[in-house]
Image (tube, rainbow, N blue to C red):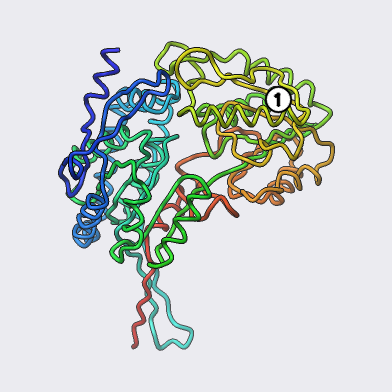
Amino acid sequence: MAQNQQAVEQVKKQLFIGGEWRDAEGGKTFEVDNPATGAELTRVADGSVADGAAALTAAADAQADWAATAPRDRSELLRAAYELIVERTDVLAELMTLEMGKPLAESRGEVTYGSEFFRWFAEEAVRISGRWSVAPNGQTRLMTMKQPVGPTLMITPWNFPLAMGTRKIGPAIAAGCTMVVKPAAETPLTMLYLAQLLEEVGLPKGVLNVVTTTDSGGVMEPLIRDPRSRKLTFTGSTPVGRKLVEQSADQLLRLSMELGGNAPFIVFGDADVDAAVEGAMLAKMRNIGEACTAANRLFVHADVADEFAKKFAAKMDALNVGDGMGDDVQVGPLINQKAVDKVTSLVQDATDRGATVVTGGAKGDGPGFFFNPTVITGVPGDAAMAKEEIFGPVAGIQVFTDEADVVRRANDTEFGLVAYFFTRDVARVVRVSEALEYGMVGVNQGIVSNPAAPFGGVKSSGYGREGGFEGIEEYLETKYVGLAL
């Protein structure tokens, strides 16, 4: 426990504005809790509207100089930050486990994943380019150039405290944008520590500003409506995303919105069932199921439904639930009591409609916000868990017999973030990949997230892409210059 407390003590608990660590207005603070115990970990600064305004001022003041910084210099800063993150893996992993709940092994995995965005965009920073061409009439030369969008507002979620920050901060630094980051109140420590690491590698003052607050709407709305802001990027729920889009309309901000999901996971009759079970474990149980990419609806062909359900339930039942800091723990707590209550109600709704709990189905004993890994069969299409994000360790299985029908059912949702399917039929791979209305599709794999690939959805799952070659474009404007001869 002393080692755990040492990790928390390494984090500065103030606001980071203009390169300085400062108390919130009036010295206000708020409590950060450990979801495994419900106990207080520490307290951090509770920023006000004035603090948010100060952060935007710092970002706006730093924008011109930062945009003029050589791409190689921005690249080297990101590369140095990547190396420092890797060096401090243990501290970052412990912070994430303590404030969010995921097992240490998963937290270390997130450090590996999250750090890769800095390495990827360090490489992209020096590859920003335009083009030169001759006008059709031959009398003008057409030149395009890429320039940074400008001061960017970033709102990050609690479920991936490091990675959801690095995949926004990385391309912004690479492109030459300054930032105001508002991390989730449930998990501020990881972002604050990341700011310390960026300060340590020499990021200029004002480029990154971090405001922790319990008044997210009150602090961020004035910044969204401020003409000095030029972009907003948000990862979170669709209802909140819609509200932010409305607020952003006044300034016609550039937007990147990574919103909710309702991912189908389809197992066709010709699939390798054992591989599909392993894929389902990854797609469902990564991050305790608290991920927008989590498999939300499992559609299994009638020919393999019994075999799949039996093997999948056995693996879910064997998972070790407990405090993420413990040895060999595979499933940590949910983020808070509200999350436990929601998952409980979804399971109850499904069983009220005739579904059968194969394993799990109840919250854990003792303190903390635990829910046992759960498999439910016979889930009807009108069950709440078939329509809403579960965001927990619960898997509901539905049976199908026809390819066209299951594709229709998979698409029958307002969301379109990610879909998964397993098959050995190459023609079906192409056919179904094209037919699924999702921004990402995993074929014979349960994880699609990769810093080298464009992450994002369609429909009510948002727009814009993070990662890949496309990720930096979200932070760049295209300027055209016509040169008359």
Tell me: 381 left or right of 282: right
Q: What residue is at 45 percent from the left and 46 percent from the top? A: 235
Q: Is residue 108 above or below residue 122?
A: above
Return the x and y of residue 439 as percentages of the image width and height. Answer: 59, 50
Quadrant in the picture for the N terminus: top left
Return the x and y of residue 190 as percentages of the image width and height. Answer: 32, 33
Return the x and y of residue 101 as percentages of the image width and height. Answer: 43, 24
Q: What residue is at 26 percent from the left and 18 percent from the top? A: 5
Of 243 and 197, the residue lying toward us: 243
The residue type indicated by label 1 comes to Ile
Quarter holding residue 269: top right
| Number of dots carrying numbers | 1
Quarter holding residue 46: top left
Q: Is residue 432 above or below residue 282?
A: below
Tell me: 235 left or right of 320: left
Q: Within 10 angstroms of label 1, few (less than 14), some, or many (20 or more) residues?
A: many
Of 202 and 130, the residue lying toward us: 202
Tell me: 414 left or right of 182: right
Q: Which residue is mark 1?
A: 376
- Check disc 1 and report its element: helix, strand or loop: strand
Return the x and y of residue 181 as percentages of the image width and height. Answer: 31, 47
Q: Is residue 23 above or below residue 72?
A: above
